[in-house]
Amino acid sequence: MSFWRALLGRSKPTTPDLDALFGLPSAAVTLRAAAGFRPTGTGSVAFRATEGAAFADLERDITALLDAGDGPPVGQVTDDYGYTWLVVRSQNPPGAEGEVTDPDITGLVTDLHAVNSTLEANGYGPSLLCSLVGFTDGQRSLGLVYLYKRGTFYPFAPTGDGQRRDNALELQIEAAVGGDLPLEQDRSRWFPVYGAPGL
């Protein structure tokens, strides 16, 4: 089959590597040290919802799975483009008295992995768009976006005025976390996700 691909000028599609999500805690440490960004504790998974009872049952199962026990509640938002975002919020671990602690990014990543894996295992992999984990330095927002179909990440830094992005910050973050995460080399695929939950 690779002979025909080469002859016709087609490349083999990249397969998703959901385990790449587990590089985010390391990237969070790098972001804090290099640029002063801390996790917001919110992450989300975007997918194109389909019609029918089977998909509605799957959404309920995912929400029940993540809401089980003492886990944080899962929210659901539909954006202007018709994508559904499942929003997961982590809890801050207890710290010493008066100590401010960062949200549990490891638990958040585990929950995001579970959402992606459940959708994928039930045949909805082609409907997955991306996963996003939010960061802030107190003034600016930043999202590390995982492109499901490419198996890569890219930084997205919206400015406070709505539909613009901070390209300089995105390039700075790309350089900082390049050793922690597989980054998308084709910058034309760094799609804006304005208004995404978690930013």
Image: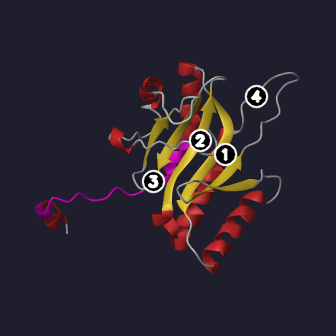
Q: CA distance from mark 4 to mark 3?
A: 30 Å
Residue 166 in the image, given as x and y percentages of width and height: 48, 27
Q: Amino acid at mark 4?
A: Thr
Please name the residue shown 49% across and 33% down the image: 164
92 left or right of 40?
right
Circle 2 residues within 10 Å: few <14, some 14–19, many ≥20: many
Do residues under tags 3 and 1 come within 8 Å of each other at their CB atoms? no
Q: Residue at x 45, y 65 (%)?
A: 126
In the rendered structure, find residue 17 and report the number of the disc placed on it. 3
User: Dot 4: what SS?
Assistant: loop
Instruction: Report the residue marked by disc 2.
Output: 133
Camera-near label (2 vs 3) is 2
Picture layout, residue 77 above or below residue 195: below
Nearest-to-viewer mark from 4 and 2: 2
Residue labelled with disc 4: 101
Q: In the image, is residue 61 above or below residue 138?
A: below
Name the residue at 52% across, 32% down.
157
On screen, 36 above or below 16?
Answer: above
Magenta residues span 7-23
Q: Callout 2, which amino acid?
A: Val
Q: Quadrant of residue 96?
A: top right
Disc on the earlier residue, 4 or 2: 4
Q: CA distance from mark 3 to mark 1?
A: 17 Å
Pointer 4 with pointer 3, Cβ within 8 A: no
Q: Are marks 2 and 1 in contact (CB under 8 Å)?
A: yes
Q: Position of residue 75 (x, y in %)?
A: 72, 54
Alpha carbons under labels 2 and 1: distance apart: 9 Å
Identified by mark 3, the residue type is Asp
